[in-house]
Image (cartoon, rainbow, N blue to C red):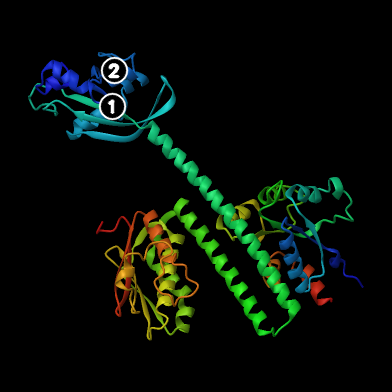
Amino acid sequence: MNPLEALGAGPEFSAYALDLIPQEAVVIDRSYTILWLNRAKRLAHPDLEAGMKCHRAFENDAPCHFCLADQAREIGQYVRNPVCILTGPRRNVPRHVNITIAPLAGRLREGTGAGDEPRFLELVDNVEAIYQSHSELERLNHEYENVIYALSHDLRSPLISIEGFLNKIEKILGKPLAEPMAHSLDRIHANVKIMNQLVNVLLDTSRIITGILDLHETDMERVAHEAAERFAAQAAEQGALIEVNGDFKVETCDRVRISQVYANLIGNALKHCSRTKGLKIELGAGNGVYWVRDNGPGIPRDFQDVVFEPFSQGSKQVKESFGMGMNIVFRIMQKHEGEIWLDSNEGRGTTVFFAFKSAPHH
Amino acid sequence: MVDYRQLETILLIEDNEDHIEHTVDALREGGLVNQINVIRDGEQALQYMNREGEFKDPKKSPRPCLVLLDVKLPKIGGFEVLERLKTDEDLKVIPVILLTTTGNKEDIERGARLGANDYIVKPVEFDNFMQKVKGLGKYWALISNLTGQ
């Protein structure tokens, strides 16, 4: 009896229907014996036939100790094992598949008195191609990172030379320099500095995109305090105050990257609120959500939608800003599978919130 | 009286002519009078250190008291040069300061793992250089040249 017959369908119809399934499909009973194979399975494994043990048992010559059919019977519903690597004496090369096992018989638990022997439909999706393309993607990522690294090195090298020769020219000319000359040299210095910062941004962004997070249990309160301390002098110069308050937790995250999140957010607040008298920056936390809040001028409504996009410039008054800080912050949180969002009202300040995937609101 | 330490040589292993010029300028402007020998690729650097080929004569190629090693070098890369120096029983005592253009964290960590004594992000500035030298026990060998001028 084929599986759909067990569910009440006619023998011709059910055999035809299951043969249409593109995945390899077999029906096994509780002793792992194959009762039926569909067309895809027969094509993939011409040597398999009804009456043999299921392919995993067949390959290993013993039932798998972690049989999905057993699990399906135990919980009474389908079990899916995404990307299972099949190996065994019959396979020289590991094969990457997704296996789904669904119970077919109506009464699954023993002793329910139905008399039905549980049967299981096993579907095998071949994900080898996806797996291979994933590996290829990783390889390309690695290559990309190497190119960016080499590029950033090679871009910086001539900048170091330019800066060095500029200094030499200035020493030869002596000071004070005549105005047009002084201005030109100043502009060259400024542009070299900008170029250097752009190379940094390039390097930073590529590292975040392609890099692997160094995840550890991290005391968020400590990270926040360290960030606040790092900016304390700059804040004092501006007459601003940085406070750390709230219910901080220990999170599994990349400490260096999260420090960078705080640094970029505090740095942004100090830059964009430089004209705010009595500027207060609060590093807060509660309910698994962290925030950096300022009482500055706020972000214009039409800019709020693009604030996390690369090279977004909110304020034309802010010099030496490429609009990459918030994008880097966004990418760091994205890499952590977390979230970042903001709340801002013109004239009433800005709060940037971020949360990790373990946060209660997720 | 000539201080014998004045004869101590610094070996600069760097392929970029501009960077060589700036580094030597920075050290000279700071007042350092040590001899600075320059090698422009990794292969020659190892030949120099092992006194092979054209570097057989110890008078022309004295063993340096300090090596400044660029990370990126032609023929044999800076990290491989570093590894060979630091796994050689005779040479491993010579302090090596890595020169990097990017200050890349991975480079710095890799250098430290291979035994680099310190690193400097280019451009090399004299104050920064002397700061690093202080920690290497070579401070007095170099500083005596400054005070003896």
Residue at the (70%, 46%) spot, across then down: B76
Visible in this render: residue A135? yes
List x then y, in percent, for residue B33.
Answer: 82, 70
In this figure, what is the number of numbered marks? Answer: 2
Residue B85 in the figure: left or right of residue B104: right
Q: Where A92 falls versus B10 (above or below)? A: above
Q: Earlier in the sequence, mark 2 or mark 1?
A: 1
Mark 2 Cα shell of 10 Å, populated few (<14), some (14-19), many (≥20): many
**Gap between marks 2 and 1, in whole Å?**
19 Å
List x then y, in percent, for residue A77.
Answer: 18, 34
Q: Where A338 falls versus A93 (above or below)? A: below
Residue B70 in the figure: left or right of residue B8: left
| Image quadrant assignment for residue A290 | bottom left
Residue A27 in the figure: left or right of residue A293: left
Q: Chain of mark 1?
A: A
Residue at the (44%, 70%) spot, across then down: A227
Visible in this render: residue A29? no
Residue A23, disc: 1
Residue A72 in the figure: left or right of residue A206: left
Residue ranking furthest to the right: B1
Residue A53, disc: 2
